Amino acid sequence: MKTLLVIGLILAVVGIVALAVPSFTYFTTDRVADVGFFKIDISRPHTVVLNPIVGGVLLTAGIVLAIVGFRSRSA
C-alpha cells in the first residue's frame, strides 16, 4: 500500500472519531497534603473539547489523500 493511502485512511478515521466524540474528559491526581503518614490526594477532571470544524477538515483531508494514494497506486 502506498504511504498516502495509509495516511489518508488514518486521517479519515481520526476525523470520523472527532466528529462522533466532540469532547472527552480525563482525570489527574494531585497530592494536596503530605503530613507524616497522612497523604491526601485529589482527582481533578480536565475536559478537552474538539471543534467540529477540526473533524471535518481531518475527514476531508483524509479522503483527498486516500483518493490521491489510490490513483497513484493503480497507475
Image (spheres, rainbow, N blue to C red):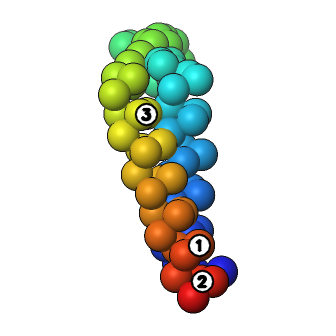
Q: Which residue is mark 1?
A: 70
In the image, residue 66 sits, relative to residue 37, either above or below, namely below
Residue 55 image label: 3
In the image, residue 74 sits, relative to residue 25, either above or below, namely below
Residue 35, x across and y down, in percent: 41, 15
Determine the secondary structure under disc 1. Answer: helix
Give the residue drawn at x 34%, y 28%. 53
Residue 66, x across and y down, in percent: 54, 63
Proximity of marks 2 and 1: CB atoms separated by less than 8 Å? yes
Seen from the viewer's position, the closer of residues 44 and 31 is 44
Q: Which residue is mark 2?
A: 73
Badge 1 amino acid: Phe
Q: Quadrant location of the C terminus?
A: bottom right
Asked if residue 69 lies left or right of residue 31, the reply is right
Can residue 31 be seen at all in this image of the molecule?
no
Badge 2 amino acid: Arg
Seen from the viewer's position, the closer of residues 28 and 18 is 18
Residue 50, x across and y down, in percent: 39, 24
Callout 2 crowding tier (Cα within 10 Å): few <14, some 14–19, many ≥20 = few
- Say which label, 3 or 2, has the lower sequence index: 3
In this view, the mark in front (3 or 2): 2
